Amino acid sequence: MPNDDVLIVGAGLAGLSCALALRGKGVGVTLLEAGDAPGGRVRTDTLDGFLLDRGFQIFLTAYPAAQRLLDYDALNLRPFVPGAVIRFDGAFRRLADPWRRPLDGVLSAIEAMSKLGEYTDALRIARLRQRALDGPLEALFQRPEVSTAESLAELGLSPGIIARFLRPYFAGIYLDPELRTSSRMLDFVFRMMAAGEATLPAGGMGAIPAQLASRVGRDRIRLRTRVAGVGPEGVTLADGESLSAGAVVLAAHEPETRRLLAARAAALGKTQETLAPPRTWNAVTCLYFDAPAPLPPPLHEPILFLNGDRFGKPDAGPINNLVVPSAVAPSYAPPGRALISVSVLGDPPMHDAALQGIVRRELTQWFGPIVEMWRLLRIYRVRHALPLQPPGSLEPAERPNETEPGLYVCGDHLDNASIQGAMASGLRAAEAVLRRMGK
Ligand SMILES: Cc1cc2nc3c(=O)[nH]c(=O)nc-3n(C[C@H](O)[C@H](O)[C@H](O)COP(=O)(O)OP(=O)(O)OC[C@H]3O[C@@H](n4cnc5c(N)ncnc54)[C@H](O)[C@@H]3O)c2cc1C
């Protein structure tokens, strides 16, 4: 390998974005990926003609880094209907678009369900929306912050609308049931929801890294290649092989990046200071079911279902949210079938069979005996899904990418934990490398 190549450790969205930006400036790159495909936490498996994302995820078209790097047309993005269908007190109630039309959205809901919230919630959600849309995106990450739970309470939103809609909604996005996540993330997510669409690519979420990988060049990605040691002049692989490089970018997830940087710092007799203190990780468990199509209402719609009882009733079941991906993008299921995705927050301490049993019980309460016809396809327990981002953890919002001359880091743990954060940090690492190279 010519030693002016840049070695990138990890082919998740951060590593791929970094590689694409470097390639765009004519810099040679090689990605070293421990897994059997690029994508990191954004992977899609195929099973019996179904597309199973490794944990339910959505792609927000307003992400600026994604707009810069991805070809949206080629991804064939399929939108969700904005808003949500909320299950509580034994019925489904529909909340129209609170992101783009908060007054209509909440008023329509209040008409339909006086129990959801209070009249003034519509005005308060409109105020939150205005706050989220004010000023440049970067400034939003400089604001004074409290937890999301505190921020919603400070806005004066009623306990009803918080428990039935906002808490399951944001808990499902952050994978943080207590909403300890910073209010900066609340504003960021609200802004992204208001400024674009929530979508799924027709080829599954894995089509996003696959597109980046094919543009970087598949021959530039070495799969099943675990890196065991790093320095600015090269890396050592787990099998003992050494590779030299003009620069090294560490794009692994946070615990592995920490381990590799700590080993490097120890070798130099220093302490690792680049990364924030270790994060707690939020987990999620996703159950996929195969069902006969067409599904009856309300399941036929490409919309998010939320459990409005989850945070209000002590005897509520474990489901936080549910979607029918094949209603959003029909390619998620083979002809005549539908795919149902159920998310349970955390990693429930029980065997899969027991978990399936309690989830089925709750689904039957929601949808009746048709649930008996649903076949479990797979359960994904994603233990390291998203780092918790409490107030303080996004300070600074963009951590430096250079740890020492020639050794760089990127990943969602350096920005905010999202597709946008991962891609943006990869782009910033590429800029740092290019600066050092004088390009
Ligand atoms: C279930 C779930 C739901 C999510 N939902 C959303 C959502 O709806 N919207 C959103 O914007 N974001 C969502 N996210 C977050 C988003 O997917 C992540 O923030 C982003 O993908 C992180 O990318 P990354 O490149 O920083 O890290 P990763 O994807 O973790 O990539 C790191 C890569 O490094 C490789 N690696 C690690 N160690 C080594 C080593 N020693 N040698 C070689 N390779 C190594 C790993 O195999 C991996 O491929 C979700 C995440 C999960 C898991």
Image (spheres, rainbow, N blue to C red):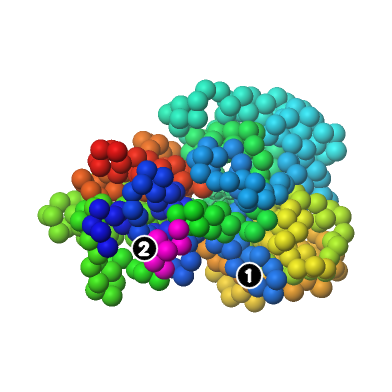
The residue shown at (67%, 49%) is 77
Pointers 1 and 2 in contact (CB under 8 A)?
no
Q: Is residue 368 left or right of residue 31?
A: right
Q: Badge 2: few (under 14), some or many (20 or more) residues near its Cα, within 10 Å? A: many
The residue shown at (22%, 61%) is 244
Secondary structure beneath dot 2 equals: strand
Residue 435: x and y in percent read: 28, 38
Above or below 237: residue 85: above
The residue shown at (30%, 44%) is 433
Residue type at mark 2: give it: Leu
Residue at the extreme left of the image, as rendered: 269
Q: Which quadrant of the view contains residue 248? A: bottom left
Front residue of 280/232: it is 232
Is the residue indicated by label 2 positioned so its CB lies within 8 Å of ligand 1? yes
Residue 80: x and y in percent read: 72, 47
Above or below 295: residue 378: below
* Residue behind mark 2: 32
Q: Is residue 218 magenta?
A: yes
For the C terminus, give its image quadrant: top left
Q: Is residue 156 visible?
A: no
* Residue behind mark 1: 46
Q: Is residue 253 left or right of residue 215?
A: left
For the N terminus, give its image quadrant: bottom left
